[in-house]
């Protein structure tokens, strides 16, 4: 009997200690900042690298992350933001798939007193103060850098006419609009340049292939340049050019954006001529901004990462692995 009483007492002490420990852990995790992040999808190596980077940086900054993937649907992103509001997260971040259509849900976040950070892409709105800041690339400058490369290349080859086809990213998204604007503004003053057609490839490899098939059928061998808004669509387009009996990188100048490892490898093979970098590594700036907002500090309205151009003008043999 005594043995039983002692055993029960020990159990009780253990249970109380365990409960105590549990509470401590809970208290610790309760005190962590909670960030709700709505990713727009998984359409590209860029996007997958961006998601991974945000997850890794959340861990290293000791921030709890509620991550939701919208699978390319704006309504899923709106639902996710509403869930974050209901859950009372400390900060909301999201990468808007397109620029329009966010006012209502962002007003809800504002009324709930939750600051919102735009990651990667921008929104278009007449309302003020719906978001705190934007952390993402300067897409206009990327378009400018792509066009500047093309002008140098046309000079080097002594081209008199340059027929361009453009495969664009998701319609009404910031990178689509800005990359196109930067590219068009820069070639505008160069009388050699003609854009035969711009076609929506939705940032997808399969669409890149489809668009290229259509463009080759329509313009056959009059195409001098493919300007593609991301690596995925470029990698989809290349085999179609080859199937048509043309040599990408030689018969057609290929210009891409992102700079993921696969595209850089193909650039080194000579089948792509130029890749403008767009870094997906936005996680560090995001976590630092979250901490600043929570500390009540002022943050910069726009944070652009540094980016560069990789092309057949350079020796790329020593280029470090890209990490996405
Ligand atoms: O270029 C593309 C991705 O918004 C910068 O989206 C991003 C773009 C990137 O799917 O590959």
Image: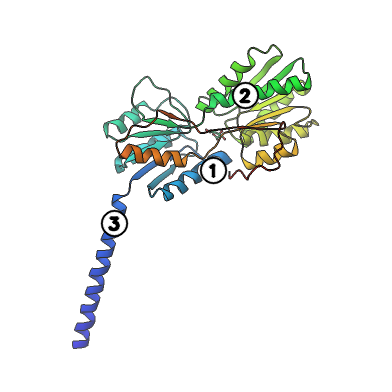
Residue with the mark numbered 2: 199
Q: Badges 2 and 1: C-beta atoms under 8 Å apart?
A: no
Measure how far apart labels 2 and 3 are at the Cα level: 52 Å
Q: Quadrant of the N terminus?
A: bottom left
For the point 39% across and 34% down, the residue is: 117
Q: Nearer the viewer, residue 293 or 174?
A: 293
User: Between disc 2 and disc 1, whose residue precedes?
Assistant: 1
Residue with the mark numbered 3: 26
For the point 78% across and 18% down, the residue is: 158
> Which color mode does the image show?
rainbow
Residue with the mark numbered 1: 49
User: Between disc 3 and disc 1, whose residue precedes?
Assistant: 3
Q: Residue 141 appears in which quarter of the rendering?
A: top right
> Residue 9 location, x and y as percent?
20, 78
> Residue 315 location, x and y as percent?
72, 37
Q: Residue 274 appears in which quarter of the rendering?
A: top right
Q: Nearer the viewer, residue 85 or 175?
A: 175
């Amino acid at each position: 009997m005594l043995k039983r009483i002692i055993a029960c007492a020990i159990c009780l002490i253990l249970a109380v200690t365990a409960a105590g420990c549990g509470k401590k852990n809970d208290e610790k995790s309760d005190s962590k900042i909670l960030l709700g992040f709505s990713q727009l999808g998984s359409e590209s190596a860029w996007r997958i690298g961006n998601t991974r980077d945000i997850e890794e940086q959340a861990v290293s900054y000791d921030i709890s992350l509620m991550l939701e993937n919208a699978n390319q649907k704006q309504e899923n992103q709106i639902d996710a933001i509403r869930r974050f509001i209901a859950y009372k997260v400390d900060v909301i971040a999201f990468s808007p798939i397109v620029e329009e259509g966010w006012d209502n849900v962002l007003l809800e976040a504002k009324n709930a007193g939750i600051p919102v950070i735009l990651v990667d892409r921008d929104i278009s709105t007449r309302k003020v103060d719906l978001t705190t800041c934007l952390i993402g690339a300067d897409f206009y400058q990327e378009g400018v850098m792509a066009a500047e490369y093309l002008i140098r290349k046309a000079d080097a080859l002594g081209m008199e006419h340059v027929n361009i086809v453009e495969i664009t990213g998701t319609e009404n998204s910031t990178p689509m609009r800005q990359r196109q604007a930067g590219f068009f503004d820069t070639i505008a003053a160069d009388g050699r340049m003609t854009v035969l057609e711009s076609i929506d490839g939705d940032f997808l490899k399969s669409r890149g292939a489809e668009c290229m098939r259509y463009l080759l059928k329509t313009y056959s061998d009059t195409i001098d340049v493919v300007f593609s808004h991301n690596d995925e669509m470029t990698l989809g387009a290349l085999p179609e050019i080859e199937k048509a009996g043309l040599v990408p990188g030689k018969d057609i100048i290929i210009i891409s954006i992102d700079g993921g490892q696969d595209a850089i490898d193909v650039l080194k093979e000579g089948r792509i001529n130029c890749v403008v970098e767009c870094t997906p590594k936005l996680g560090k700036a995001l976590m630092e901004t979250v901490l600043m907002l929570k500390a009540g500090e002022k943050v910069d309205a726009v944070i652009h990462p540094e980016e560069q151009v990789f092309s057949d003008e350079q020796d790329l043999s020593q280029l470090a692995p890209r990490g996405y």
